[in-house]
Each structure stands twice: as C-alpha cells, then as structure tokens.
Image (cartoon, grey):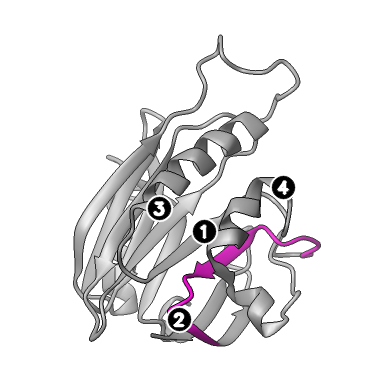
Amino acid sequence: EIARWQADVVALNEVYTGEKEEFNNQTEKLANGAGFSFFEFAQGYDFGWAQIGNSLLSKYPLTDIQKIPVLAPTEGERLPNETQWYEDRVILKGTVGAEKPFDILATHFGLNGQEQTRMMQALLKVLDNCTRPLVLLGDFNVRPHQEILKPLYERLQSTADVMGNTDNTFPSWDANRTLDYIFVSSEFKVLDYEVGKEIVSDHLPVKAVIEL
C-alpha cells in the first residue's frame, strides 16, 4: 500500500521493533517492501516485549538524523483529570538530500493534554532552530485549529488548508475527525493534498504534493 502512493518520503507512526519476528525491524521491512533505499527508526516507548516509535522512509539519502525523546510525565506529575494512556514519545528529524535539501520531522502527540504540551514545547525548539525548508508530519491527536496547534499555524502552512481539503482521517473505518497533518514551511508550494480511503491502519493515510 505504501508503494502504491509513489511517495518520495514517508513518515510513519506506531512502528515496532523487537525480538519477535512480527515486530522485528518493521521499518527496514517496510522500506525494502515499498522500494525505499533509505530509512530511519526512532524509539518512543519501550513495552519490554517490543519498542514503538516513528519512522522515515526515503528515496533520497537521510542525513543529520536526530532522535529527540519527549518523556511522558511520571506518575507523580500526572494531572488527576487526564486518564488516557501515557506513553514516551519521540521526534524523528532528518535532512532529505534531494536536489534541494530540506528538513523533515516525524512526530506523534500523546492523548493527554499534559503530554501534548510537552511535545509542542519540544517541537517548537526544534522548529525554531531549523535553517532549511522543512516538512512536519504525523498524528497530532488533536483536531484542526485547537489551541495547542496555534504555534504551528503561526509558523507553517497546513497542506490540507492550502488545498481546502476537509476530509477526515480518523477512525479509518468511519472517519469523523482530522488528527493527522502535513505542515510545510513557506518555501514550499503546495500542489495537492489527499486523504486515502484504504483501511490499513486505524488512521487514513494523508499525502501532499509539494514543490521547493
């Protein structure tokens, strides 16, 4: 399914690695199966039996890789009204060595507000230190234009907004909200945006065609 989209670069969330064959090196297996020469995995949470995180697959070299951990609040730090699952997260950043290099970031926000605030704070530090054009992708677990996303809209373009696309992305079997985004810096021209309809995950895939 990834290969069918014919993308140059792909960001994935909730990718596993572990000792059991069904979890072991999923990033490499997906890259090989979909025809990508370059790939990176960044671990977020360690279940013990497997590790989960974000991945990048690319047809161009990936350099300057950074894996920035964003730890969940400890049990003593957690707010009593936030009872969703807590999970350590990670920001995976790299430089795509296309004809015109650009930075790419894969992120996955948590479910609790406190987690989301921590992720946004870490993400803004990374964004504000980027010196190249950049693309930011991932499952943000919040709806468009919620207050937590305001700093991103101030810095970047939502490819869906540019194209006027309001298709929902979650849940894949009956999508009634948007949680997944592709943001780009102002150097990019957004040519197209699409939400796929194929059910291969609990989220629908999103694709943007951009020009630097």
Label 3: element kind = helix
Determine whether 125 is above or below 188 in the image.
Answer: above
Mark identifier at residue 58: none
Q: CA distance from mark 3 to mark 1?
A: 18 Å
Q: Residue at x 72, y 47 (%)?
A: 147
Tell me which amino acid carries mark 3.
Asp
Q: Are marks 3 and 1 in contact (CB under 8 Å)?
A: no
Residue type marked 2: Phe
Residue 128 circle label: 3
24 in the magenta segment: no
Residue at mark 4: 147
Disc 2 marks which residue?
A: 188
The residue carrying mark 1 is 138
- Neighbourhood count class around disc 3 (C-alpha, 10 Å): few under 14, some 14–19, many 20 upward: few
Q: Please state the total of marks drawn on the protein image.
A: 4
Q: CA distance from mark 2 to mark 1?
A: 18 Å
Whole-angstrom CA distance, mark 4 to mark 1, is 17 Å
Q: Circle 2 — which element?
A: loop
Front disc: 4 or 1: 4
Q: Secondary structure at mark 1?
A: strand
Residues drawn in magenta: 174-190
Three-letter amino acid code at the position of disc 1: Gly
Residue 181 magenta-drawn? yes
**Residue 122 in the figure: left or right of residue 113:** left
Q: Mark 2: few, some, or many residues within 10 Å (few <14, many ≥20)?
A: some
